[in-house]
Image: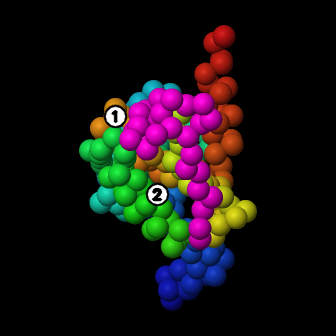
Amino acid sequence: MFRFVLPIILALTFPLEVLSGQFGLEVGETVKSIREKGVTLSNDGGYWYITDKLPKGNSKLDNYSLLITPVSGLCRIVARATSIQTNSFGDQLKSKFEFFETALNKKYGVGEKYDYVKYGSIWDDNKYWMMGLLEKERNLATFYKKDDNNLPSYMNGIVLRAFARNSGEGVINLNYEFSNVDQCFEEEDAANTDNL
């Protein structure tokens, strides 16, 4: 009988939102526990790990970078979509961005969108949209913040951003930052400055 009562007690004590995570991973998880879920992690330097599959990954995403520190565990996931071939106007990249933005807006509420070219940029004409993005003089991003959107309690924010790899190819990144991200950054900074 205790076997049946324990799950009920746990469900009442911890809301489902706390027990669930992003892409099948939990906030604060260790490298070991993530590997035990069948995820192949390669160290990308420091506390960053990369993989091409997660337990509940998305078919539109083909690469994930995870920030996992020794004390705070998993605190950030940067997911990348497949590279997108596009014209100089960035039409195909913008279309893929809008696909993800629509899905995130539906799930978390409308985010704060930034779509602009910096004042004085020589890439301000629409036919140079990709060059502006490549030269980091143009931005296309939408921010979802804990205070303004319907984010789960374990998540601080999400950033959807378009990047250019060259004038004819771009990529979409989704950056998920969890509630323990500040502690992770402190650990990462301490590790990077230890031997100075």
Total numbered circles: 2
* Residue at image location 65% in from the left, 49% down from the top: 180
Horizontal and vertical percent position of residue 169: 31, 39
Residue that mark 2 sits on: 25
Question: Which amino acid type is marked by label 2?
Answer: Leu
Query: Range of the magenta residues?
Result: 109-135
Left or right relative to 134: residue 136: right
Magenta region includes residue 107: no
* Residue at image location 57% in from the left, 45% down from the top: 116
Horizontal and vertical percent position of residue 102: 46, 67
Residue that mark 1 sits on: 167
Closer to the N terminus: mark 2 or mark 1? 2
Left or right relative to 52: residue 140: right
Q: Quadrant of the C terminus?
A: top right
Question: Which amino acid type is marked by label 1?
Answer: Ser
Horizontal and vertical percent position of residue 72: 62, 44
Q: Nearer the viewer, mark 2 or mark 1?
A: 1
Farthest residue in the bottom direction?
Answer: 1
Secondary structure under the numbered disc 2 in the rendered image: loop
Q: Badge 2: few (under 14), some or many (20 or more) residues near its Cα, within 10 Å?
A: many
Farthest residue in the left direction?
Answer: 85
